[in-house]
Image (cartoon, rainbow, N blue to C red):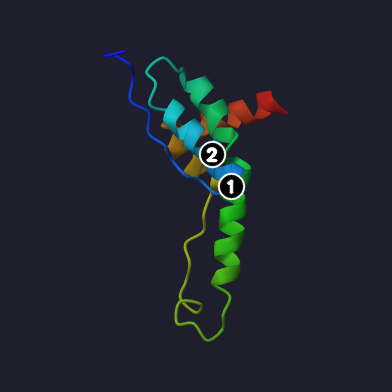
Amino acid sequence: MANSPKVKVKEVNTRDKVLEWIILNQFGRRNLSAYERSILALRLKPIYEEKAKVNMYKGTNQFSPVANSPKPSVNTREEISKLAGVGSNTISKGSKDRS
């Protein structure tokens, strides 16, 4: 067993974090096509949308100096395409194929 792989234990507290870690780990593989990367990235879309909602609600405090500053709009498709390393058109095509 001298050549057995080392295992790293990661603690995560939600199923979404596990899914996110698995998908981001898969992006490190060299044999995924752009289409396959976009399909994997689209599985993260609900997670990122939920994070965006949480961040939006956190910024609604009227007494916060950040609340009155202009916030850049976030395009989920653009963010997911950056994450997957593909164009937003590839993400659009993948989302149409999934539905």
Q: Which mark is residue 18?
A: 2
Q: Nearer the viewer, residue 95 or 4?
A: 4
Q: Nearer the viewer, residue 6 or 31?
A: 6
Q: CA distance from mark 1 to mark 2?
A: 7 Å
* Secondary element at tag 1: loop
Does residue 1 sit above or below 6 in this rendering? above
Q: Are there few (<14), some (14-19), or many (20+) residues within 10 Å of tag 1?
A: few
Q: Which mark is residue 89?
A: none
* Residue 75 screen position, x and y as percent: 53, 49
* Secondary element at tag 2: helix
* Residue 55 screen position, x and y as percent: 54, 63
Does residue 48 sit above or below 87 in this rendering? below
Instruction: Check disc 1 and report the residue beneath it.
Output: 14
**Which residue appears farthest toward the front when viewing the image?**
1
Report the amino acid beneath label 2: Val
Q: Residue at x 48, y 37 (%)?
A: 21
* Residue 5 screen position, x and y as percent: 33, 20
Q: For the C terminus, which image quadrant?
A: top right
Q: Report how many numbered discs are placed on residues in the image.
A: 2
